[in-house]
Amino acid sequence: MSKKTGTKTIQKGKVGAFLQRSSVPILFILICAVCIPMAGLSPSYLINEIVTRMGRNAFLILSLLIPIMAGMGLNFGMTLGAMAGEIGLILVSDWQIVGIPGMVLAMIISVPISILLGLFCGKILNMAKGREMITSYIISYFINGVYQLVVLYLMGSIIPIKHSSIKLPRGYGIRNTVSLLEMRQKLDNLIPLTIGGVKIPVMTFIIIGILCLVIIWFRRTKLGQDMRAVGQDMEVARDAGINVERTRILSIIISTVLAGIGMIIYLQNMGNIATYSSHSQIGMFCIAALLVGGASVDKASIGNVFLGVILFHLMFIVAPRAGAAITGDSMIGEYFRVFVSYAVITVALVMYETNKRKAKSMESEQLKQEQLEEENK
Amino acid sequence: MTAFRKVWYMNMENTPLLEMRNIKKDFFGNQVLSDINLTLREGEVIGLVGENGAGKSTLMRILFGANMIRETGGYGGEILLNGEVQKFESPFDAIEAGIGMVHQEFSLIPGFTTTENILLNREPKKKNLISEIFGERMNTLNRGEMEKKAADAIEMMGVNIDPKMVISDMPVGHKQFTEIARELSKEQLKLLILDEPTAVLTEKEAEALLDAIRGMAKRGIAIIFITHRLQEILSVCDRVVVMRDGYIVNESPAKETNVGQITKWMVGRDVKNSGAALETRNHENARTILSIEKLWVDMPGETVRNVNLEVKEGEILGIGGLAGQGKLGIPNGIMGLYPSGGKITFDGKDIPLNAPKKCLDSSFAFVSEDRRGVGLLLDETLEWNIAFPAMQIQNKFLKNYLGGLIKWRDEKAIKVVTDQYIKELAIKCTSSKQKAKELSGGNQQKVCLAKAFALEPRLLFVSEPTRGIDVGAKALVLDALKKFNRENGVTVVIVSSELEELRQSCDRIAIVSGGKIAGILPASSSVEELGALMLSQVI
Amino acid sequence: MNEKAINKKEKSWFGKLVESYGLPRLIITAFLLLLLILAPFVGADLPTQVSNIIARFSWNGILVLAMVPMVHSGCGLNFGLPLGIISGLLGATMSIEFGFTGPLSFVMAILIATPFALVLGTVYGWLLNKIKGGEMMIATYVGFSSVSLMCMMWLILPYKSPNMVWGLSGKGLRTTISLEGYYNEVLANFLRIRIGNLDIPVGTLLFFTVLALGIWAFLHTKTGTAMTAVGSNPTFARAAGINVDKMRLLSVVMSTWLAAVGILVYEQGFGFVQLYMAPFYMALPAVSAILIGGATVNKATIMNVIIGTILFQGIVTMTPTVMNNMIHMDMSEVIRIIVSNGMILYALTRKTEGAK
């Protein structure tokens, strides 16, 4: 920021700014409004689905908030945490520790793995400042390779796996699907509650609520404040004596650990692990949901998470049915929702990059104005 | 030692707050500071003035423990605070010792409030259970305490700014005050360095700042005030210290001097040094080849406002002025590198702005001050660097096939022309295939000149031709420009911070101050006259 | 002691090699050589293996070549390759739909794909000019979005040819379409050399050579020079009167068109047109291939393309055979993922020298 060019910020119309910020959620509300009647699904079914998906996904999406706060953009590397969570669950199901204790143990196993992966990811991202997103995206592919190496070849051969139910017939490697029947929705049903036919996963919501409180509290800590500072201007933060690199790594580690725990919550709801694919799409869907909720690459709130879950998954549920109703082909809707997920991310990225440039052109406009004023005097 | 300083020392009962003894500094053999002695007492305000490059910034960097000083081999002499020798390993040591500095560039987090910025990384904290386990970064911020401390600092400064306002919504002046308040909030602060703090302020704000300086001094804080606005120095400082070419040339109580005298000290040269222009030519009767009307340029840090200027055919026109006053904006704006507006007429034809191609088509050429950023393809060969613009603009060094449909690069012709310039300008390199980034600064500058010469322009802009190159190369570069002007009849406009250089090479010198042309004088004018113009409209 | 001294000496020699050739590339080359040496011992037939590598090189070469123009103009690695591939697929399916067969169907596929590539490339290039600095991430997602959009289109567009649509419903394209009777191996069969188990698809290699020479020649013209300068230092280029945006746009269009042709050549070797999600993952192998060949985010040569494609495809084809025969464990897929993405990571984390 150069002093000599400092200009007064021109206040845009507040309504316009609000509309611009919330254009994506508004668009989704419109899509849903069109699709819901066509899908012909009952309201109670929809509400049930949304509530379930809220419990399933919210924790995972919340894990994205902290790197955004630290200016590292959308953490495509959250997949790393998801893999750590899966490894925890695979081991726990082999040890046949079931129910809530199994989940807790899986989380305990996942945390050190998440920390290591987060540390690796954070270090790499510090080497690729300015292109964190593409790098974290490639890291997720890279670690996926390592994950496959571990799960497909090392488990059963080096890492002891006892039970043939999860082992591939060849004697090593994990099957494509690992059943979590004994763990299925144990957390969701811990405190059973049904209101008007809608099953509420009370305990899951409580945990999500706690995480929200923790995030709000975290923003008020010294570390949270440092992350906000680093996120806005690394150089200024460094001049003020903040350890920028360490702060950035910490934000990624926290995000990865949370993603690991979130993945365990997600999978206990699903009831089984698709060993080689559960994690691969999770990053994309979580990021898309967050963006649908009105977040941007450099700004996201807890509100965005919940609005995003509702709108994105509403679209997810109704699109195939609506598509089938229009074209008679259910695949259209399937593809439509995939397309929308990607398109939303694309639009958010484009908007982020173009906004960066806007401020610049405003400055020369102002100088032109000043010159005109001077001439008219 | 002046009589004044003797009195000064006699009056001193206790040790001074700051003493700098025999400070010396060179950058790789290039002496930039010599025998600097500076003393400062509690509550004293000194004004530090000098042209750009006089050594003010380097001196302050040494005092503030900047990393850049250590990386370039440290400094000679010693710094004493309260009589104790200090060796700062980093700016943080200097801050610890009670030195604060407000830099020319803002160092603020745009999305934070005034309070948050004032206490950046020094926030008061509250302990909690989690921080006991995970360490003190998990302490929560004590917002109440933060607000109190920030309010105290603002109060101490004596200028009213909103502690809850977000920086990005603030007028520039308030940002400046936030920075000052940040320094004041440091309890150990004893010495505050203000580097051109009024440059961005409105007249009213500047007044408020001067009041604030007086207030701070009363509280016992010593202040080093760097500015080009000499009136401010006279009104607020106890003492004026004038630097020139790495020396302190004069120290005087502010009451005993005036603007004229300070200007003279700043720009004055010894008689033997001031080898005035060799042969200034008079082009008064020549026709105007380039006329600039109402030019504005939005070049960050070098804003140009409403410039009118006429360049005569065949002359060498110099454009001088202090850094940041807009002299660099003029060629950069005309050549379309920064957004600009106004009217440019060359040889009777209007030249559209914001279109580099149109300028080059009209036989302009430009040697940029930013060699590495604009002037060179660092990763490519000298051949490419020298031949590229001529190839693209004038279709030189190309072989045409299929009736001009395919324009093939003529490597042979490129090599010939490159070798020719390597010889002519004595560019030191292993071959014409060497990468530009491997050359020294002076030789890179010669490559930039060769690039412009290869265009065979009718009008050549050269921006800071000797910046960052050694003495030998300087002379060579200036001679090459003069020769190019004399032998090819090319009109040349040289933009430079170094008055001496302009006086030696140019026919006329236009001085830019505050983004405008402050005046045009023949190159034979005295440095004092030119210096006065330089400071006339400083912003 | 003595040993140490020798080690030191070797290191300096080794160090030089590492510097000029790049450590990752060196490891990969050594790995590939090791695989080739091991192959006969584990019972794999070397000529077959070499033929495989050459064949896969000929399929993929042009897709890797498509990276070159955008790298030269400073747009970075073209993660948006699927966009060009889609143009190629449109060309392929339309050529079949319009009833062209044999070699003519290949020519027509290229001709029909061209306008699509030009239009899509222009739009894509325009977008990339708006978001300078963030090209790679956005390119990735432009690729993904367009692939998923086309998934819907393949179902909706009124294709009729019974060889392409689902047999039951009679509408919507199949996921894989056989090219038997169309342009299966049309290039490969041209001047094909078969000696024992060695099989060289000369035609495809020639086709690649022609395009590679074309790019090489283009980079030696006035416009090509300007494009390289834009990539090397955009400000320098602008100061020299170059329209930077136009150059970048041109490079994107070229990349897109090459990708379109590249996928058609791939299909003629592979024998099938793959639709729907298939183009999705085609960018990453091409990106890592050119990086393995020694290119960086802002510098790439034709040699990088050739070396990179050989190394990458060599590893992809050799590891399954050799590994399977050796330890009865097919780890090739995992190795491919780790190597290719590791290579991209390596390139992304390296400081881009000089530029800007």
Image (cartoon, coloured by chain):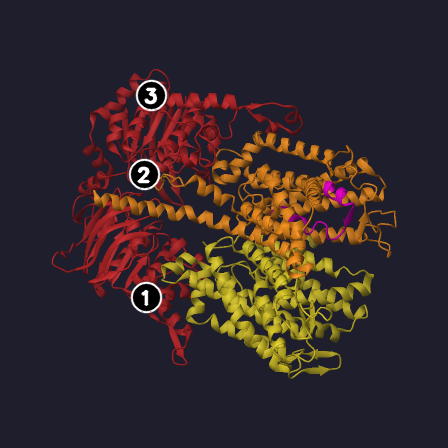
Chain colours: A orange, B red, C yellow
**Callout 3 and callout 1 share a chain:** yes
**CB atoms at circles 3 and 1 under 8 Å apart?**
no
In space, the residues marked 2 and 1 are separated at their CA atoms by: 38 Å
Label 2 resides on the chain identified as B
Q: Secondary structure at mark 2?
A: loop
| Range shown magenta | A264-287
Q: Secondary structure at mark 1?
A: helix
Q: Please tell me which residue lies in front, B318 or A145.
A: A145
The answer to which quarter of the image holds residue A72 is top right
Q: Name the amino acid, label 3.
A: Gly
Label 1 resides on the chain identified as B
Mark 1 crowdedness (10 Å alpha carbons): few <14, some 14-19, many ≥20: many
Residue C145 in the image: state x and y as whole percent. 59, 57
**Callout 2 and callout 1 share a chain:** yes
- Of pointers 3 and 1, the one earlier in the residue sequence: 3
The answer to which quarter of the image holds residue B440 is bottom left
Query: Which residue is label 1 attached to?
Result: B454
Q: Which mark is residue B246?
A: 2
Query: Which residue is label 3 attached to?
Result: B215
Residue C96 in the image: state x and y as whole percent. 63, 76
Horizontal side of C113 relative to B327 (left or right) equals right
Does residue C95 sit above or below C71 in this rendering?
Answer: below
Q: Name the amino acid, label 2.
A: Gly
- Of pointers 2 and 1, the one earlier in the residue sequence: 2
Residue C50 in the image: state x and y as whole percent. 71, 73
